[in-house]
Amino acid sequence: MIHGFKIHPDDNVATLLVDAGPGPVVVGGPAAPADLTLAAAIELGHKVALADIPAGAAIVKFGVSIGLASRDVHRGEWVHLHNCRSRFDARSSTLDVHTGATTDTRYE
């Protein structure tokens, strides 16, 4: 069973096709399926690191940078707002990790 999918050969993240982990999963994509061990449970549609990504390095999906690692991200780790930031929006690192809602501005 394929649990996740790597879209482009240059990607360093894959998208999960099912809720999975922690533990072993199989990631499909442009190359032969690869085994990966998730560090924690990750939900369907979320990204997982396919390799260690140092702080400041590009998070690559679709063959393009979708953000920067805000800290070291380890292979098998969930990649989301808590460890990925935008190159264009300084506020991206203040968003709620689960809802994406702003935490620095109150809307009434």
Image (tube, rainbow, N blue to C red):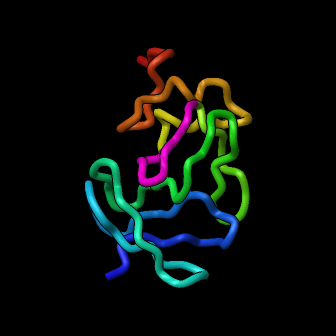
Q: Residue 89, percent across and down?
A: 68, 30
Q: Say which of 107 and 6 sits in front.
A: 6
Q: Residue at x 41, y 64 (%)?
A: 36
Magenta stretch: dominant SS?
Answer: loop
Residue 25, located in which quarter of the rendered image? bottom left
Q: Is residue 67 left or right of residue 79?
A: right
Q: 88 above or below 41?
A: above
Q: Say which of 28 and 102 sits in front.
A: 28
Q: Say which of 9 and 97 sits in front.
A: 9
Q: 18 above or below 60?
A: below
Q: Say which of 80 and 24 sits in front.
A: 24
Q: Is residue 11 left or right of residue 22?
A: right
Q: Residue 62, percent across and down?
A: 66, 65
Residue 22, located in which quarter of the rendered image? bottom left
Residue interval drawn in magenta = 71-79
Q: 24 above or below 51?
A: below
Q: Residue at x 47, y 43 (%)?
A: 80
Q: Residue 31, percent across and down?
A: 59, 82
Q: Is residue 40 left or right of residue 69?
A: left
Q: Residue at x 41, y 17 (%)?
A: 108
Report how many numbered discs are placed on residues in the image: 0
Q: 64 above or below 9?
A: above
Q: Residue 46, percent across and down?
A: 42, 55
Q: Residue at x 51, y 63 (%)?
A: 14
Which quadrant holds the N terminus? bottom left
